[in-house]
Amino acid sequence: MRKNDERHFHVEALKEAGHEYEALSGDDAWHYRSLLREKQDYQKETGRAMLAWKDNQLASRANDIATEKNARFESIKVKLLEMGWDEKDLPTSNRDFRDLVLKDQKLTPKIWQNIKPKLEPLLETHRAERLAQEKVARERNRKQALTKFYHQVGREIMDLPFEHPRLGDFLPAIGTLFALPSVKPLLENDAETVTEEQWIEVAPEARLILFKWWRDSLKQLLGSTEKGGAASSDEANEDAQDGASSETETEEAIASSIVALRARVSSVTSVFHCKASWCGRKIWWFPDLIKHGAFTHYCDSIGELSDRLSLPQPESQELVKRLLKDLGVDLETVKPSDTIINDQNQKNYLCARCDEKIAKYMTFTELIEHYLDAQKWFDDVTEAVRTSPDGCYPSRAANSELPKIVNDHDWISRDAWLVRQDDEETKEAVLKLQRDFIKEGLTDPLCDKQGIGGEDLEKNPWREVQKCCRLCPTAFAPRPCGIRKIELHIRSKHDKEPNLETDTTSVLFYSTSSCFL
């Protein structure tokens, strides 16, 4: 039956079956339907069996084709290897190559003679690409080996008590090493890598470069702590000698200079101040400042690290000396690695210039920052009043005397103690005194309070009259605080007995939670 007559054939067959079924009745009709179902099931089973047979035939043929292709490929590969080609030269990913070798056709001598001229250009091209890539890989391996040796020597010369992946970035650029005349042959020699024996032969020149770099880096750091100060005669002589004989310097002489410079930059008074406002710790000593720069600020050079450090004035070095002297520490023996400086989790030090009722126990670095912040506040206030007194005190009467402002944390011109270190018993007594001082301020009759005292102390929200200092210039006054605390501020910062009516203004402070006492 032709394809265009299939529909007509099926329609006619249905009509004929319908007529036959209508002519039957009872059991005959039931048997007729059963016969039709049997025929239908038989046709379905026959169709499935035919499809399965066809799939098996195709799969078997596919396996045969794959076997024939692999056999042809192996035969061609054997012939190519006999010709001197390497298995790596076979461009198996090249489409033209695959079209020539992967065919389900047996390799005969005639066919081989026909495809051989077509294969050779493909093999030559692939071999050239492979050799070029291997040459680049060997050069990369040599550079990596030299870089590893270079960084290893650099870490040994720096002699830092910690490891960090970015320390290698601090060293002079690796191109400096590659440019050395003794190193160039190692790079140009087409060897797989650079051995340790080969490195030992060129290491002295590399070590000299790194020694000079580390010496100059220590000078750079040391200069940042001594900016503005006159260089010592020894340092001046050393710089002159460096300029005169930089070409004839020996490793031993530079190493000796590094020892002296490191001793100076590692001095406990050589403090560095981090410029980042978001850093939790501002004061750093060598060598921890390098670790801080690498870990926190991702610095990759001493120059970048120096840019992130503010340059402490000589007064800050004098501050450290005074603090250590008050703590009974021998400046000749103490080092930045000692516990007094590195134990940053212990808040053991109390500022002796702050009133005991409000002073806070601090770490040693926090104590330094506390004094530096107090000095900065005084300097900024003094400058603001000098340049614009009317802007600082807009409501003062004409020609009236300006309020007195004193630097109660002055550590230069005053010999009073700066710090004390309390034992646990004294520390607990001070903390109790501060808690009593807060309660005293909250229960003062001058404090307009609700929810303070009695049974409501820990239940109800509370409000407090807080005071602002009018003696401080605008924008320099402390935050509003309790009456007793503002009195301490006026006595310490303005050196006078407080008059709450004239020296302060009132602000109501409301708490949205229970009293903190």
Image (tube, rainbow, N blue to C red):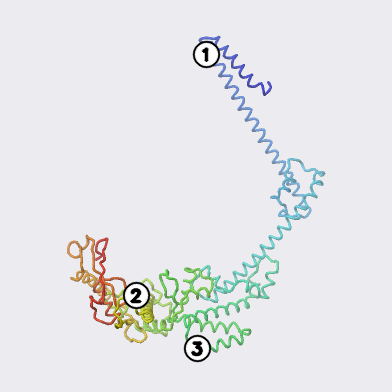
Q: Which of 30 and 470 is in front in this view?
A: 470
Q: Which of 84 and 320 is in front in this view?
A: 320
Q: Nearer the viewer, residue 201 or 231?
A: 231
Which numbered disc, 2 or 1, marks the residue closer to the eye? 2
Q: What element carries label 3?
A: loop
The crowding category of the residue bearing disc 2, from other C-alpha atoms within 10 Å (few below 14, some 14 to 19, many at least 20), is some
The Cα atoms of the two marked residues, 2 and 1, are separated by: 109 Å
- Residue 157 in percent (x, y) is at 55, 77
The three-letter code of the residue at mark 3 reads: Ser
Q: In which quarter of the image is the N terminus?
A: top right
The three-letter code of the residue at mark 2 reads: Phe
Residue 503 is marked as: none
Badge 1 is on which residue? 30
Q: Quadrant of the C terminus?
A: bottom left
In the rendered structure, the answer to whether residue 287 lies left or right of residue 171 reads left
The answer to the question of whether label 1 and label 3 lie on touching residues, with beta carbons closer than 8 A, is no
Q: What element carries label 2?
A: loop
The answer to the question of whether label 2 and label 3 lie on touching residues, with beta carbons closer than 8 A, is no
Badge 3 is on which residue? 232
> Of callouts 2 and 3, which one flags the residue occurring earlier in the amino acid sequence?
3
The crowding category of the residue bearing disc 3, from other C-alpha atoms within 10 Å (few below 14, some 14 to 19, many at least 20), is few
Q: What element carries label 1?
A: helix
Badge 2 is on which residue? 476
